[in-house]
């Protein structure tokens, strides 16, 4: 069984590739390496003993997709390829609409041409915006507040229209909460190219001395300790959720929409405490002003995924921190060698990203 994984060299896609291989799929990874590197393929090989097929290419390139679909009999597509930085999407919205929406359309058109109709889409809890009620259920209104979030809503709507028009498609819209952690081998993990925006990778970089201290954005929220609450989910649980979705689609045509979260929440201070415990490192931090646009508390109602997919997240915050630490401690500069990372920081290499 061949599965096309777009964006499979990235953080979530690479973990899904590992889980897919273990479940008997042969992954064909299509990635333009705009936010990752080919060395991930080696690491997937090292973990699983199987080398995924890798094609360097852009999902917006219809010719590349035709080549892929005509060369392999593809059974299903996991579509991760996208830009994902909320702040950046405000600055360069056209790039986000072009890559995320345009890329998805090109993939769907190629699938239609080659009669492949099983599609799993990386949506996000960001589609809900500031929720009226927590935990968030799937029927809660969507209220996107950034161009990035709007790309996810637009694609979700395209997928709904497609299943309405052609009911034999099998499509999952998976709304991720806050993916963190790494494969327990420490061989793959999240590797932000620049200073991390997200909490867990920032803490991990403080722990290895790449950053001096963490700024905690806001200590005056109406929560149990004044810091924001989020539903952090281990990336391996998330990956297993994709396999559960594929299993569900095998037996069901139409559109599936589920939250992938744990159904629990942790505060920023709780994450810091758990990371200190897991790593044995001190994490210096200071509480500073709120980050514009932050929502004080949101987490998933995870019951629909359990009911429909028989899936639930199994790994707790301690495991998320321990696995992040194992990955970061073994790879303090991510997948790149330290000198390469330093050159990148200084803007000396040709691949540096903004
Ligand atoms: P990532 O940046 O690590 O991985 C995305 C991969 O897609 C990268 O390897 C990148 O090189 C590739 N890519 C981007 N544009 C491409 C294109 N046009 N053609 C081919 N490859 C392309 O991101 P991630 O964290 O693994 O996220 C994967 C998906 O999950 C994205 O769609 C993202 O929006 C979604 N998501 C992520 C999070 C999160 O917190 N990480 C949360 C919710 C949803
Ligand atoms: N956060 C923080 N310092 C950081 C990064 C994040 O205090 O350097 C907080 C942020 O304000 C939010 C929580 O950590 O309350 C999770 O942030 P992240 O960006 O990881 O996820 P998101 O806000 O997108 O859910």
Image (cartoon, rainbow, N blue to C red):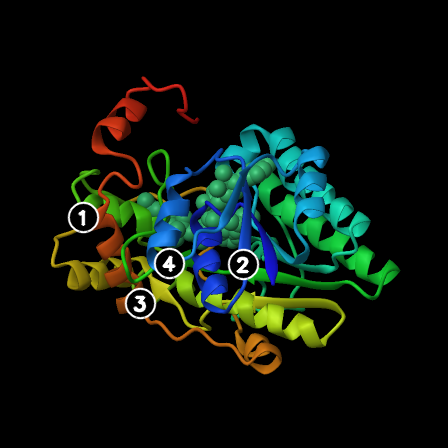
> Marks 1 and 4: CB-CB under 8 Å?
no
Which residue is label 2 attached to? Answer: 26
Whichever of labels 3 and 4 marks the residue nearer the N terminus, that label is 4
Residue placed at 33% from the left, 67% from the top? 224
Whichever of labels 2 and 3 marks the residue nearer the N terminus, that label is 2
Whether the residue carrying mark 2 lies under 8 Å from ligand 1 is answered with no
Which residue is label 1 attached to? Answer: 207
As drawn, the residue found furthest toward the front would be 71
Residue placed at 22% from the left, 42% from the top? 332
Q: How far is disc 2 from disc 4 in space, using C-alphas? A: 12 Å
Mark 1 lies on a secondary structure that is helix
Q: How far is disc 1 from disc 4 in space, using C-alphas? A: 31 Å
Q: Nearer the viewer, residue 295 or 345?
A: 345
Residue placed at 40% from the left, 43% from the top? 291
Q: Look at discs 2 and 1 and give the one toward the viewer.
A: 2
Which residue is label 3 attached to? Answer: 317
Q: Is residue 348 above or below residue 72?
A: above
Quadrant into which the C terminus falls: top left
Q: Quadrant of residue 296?
A: bottom left
Which residue is label 4 attached to? Answer: 49
Whichever of labels 2 and 1 marks the residue nearer the N terminus, that label is 2
């Amino acid at each position: 069984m061949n599965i096309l994984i777009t964006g499979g060299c990235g953080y979530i896609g690479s973990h899904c590739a590992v889980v897919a291989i273990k479940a008997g799929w042969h992954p064909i990874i299509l990635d333009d390496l705009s936010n990752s590197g080919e060395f991930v393929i080696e690491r997937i090989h090292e973990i699983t003993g199987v080398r995924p097929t890798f094609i360097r290419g852009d999902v917006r390139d219809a010719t590349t997709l035709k080549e892929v679909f005509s060369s392999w009999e593809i059974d299903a597509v996991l579509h991760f390829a996208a830009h994902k930085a909320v702040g950046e999407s405000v600055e360069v919205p056209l790039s986000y609409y072009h890559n995320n929406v345009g890329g998805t359309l090109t993939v769907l058109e190629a699938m239609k041409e080659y009669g492949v109709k099983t599609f799993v889409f990386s949506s996000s809890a960001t589609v809900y915006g500031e929720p009226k009620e927590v935990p968030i259920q799937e029927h809660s209104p969507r209220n996107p507040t950034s161009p990035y979030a709007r790309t996810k809503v637009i694609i979700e709507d395209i997928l709904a229209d497609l299943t309405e028009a052609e009911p034999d498609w099998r499509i999952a819209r998976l709304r991720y909460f806050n993916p963190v952690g790494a494969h327990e081998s420490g061989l793959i993990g999240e590797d932000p190219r620049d200073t991390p925006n997200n909490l867990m990778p920032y803490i991990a970089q403080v722990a290895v001395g790449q950053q001096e201290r963490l700024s905690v954005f806001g200590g005056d929220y109406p929560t149990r300790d004044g810091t924001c609450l989020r539903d952090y989910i281990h990336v391996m649980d998330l990956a297993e959720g994709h396999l559960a979705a594929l299993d569900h689609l095998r037996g069901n045509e139409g559109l599936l929409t589920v939250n992938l979260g744990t159904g629990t929440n942790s505060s920023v201070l709780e994450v810091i405490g758990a990371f200190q415990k897991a790593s044995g490192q001190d994490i210096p931090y200071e509480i500073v002003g709120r980050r514009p646009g932050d929502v004080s508390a949101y987490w998933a109602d995870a019951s629909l995924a359990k009911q429909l997919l028989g899936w639930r997240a199994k790994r707790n915050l301690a495991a998320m921190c321990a696995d992040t630490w194992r990955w970061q401690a073994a790879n303090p500069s991510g997948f790149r060698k330290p000198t390469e990372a330093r050159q990148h920081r200084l803007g000396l290499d040709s691949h540096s990203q903004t």
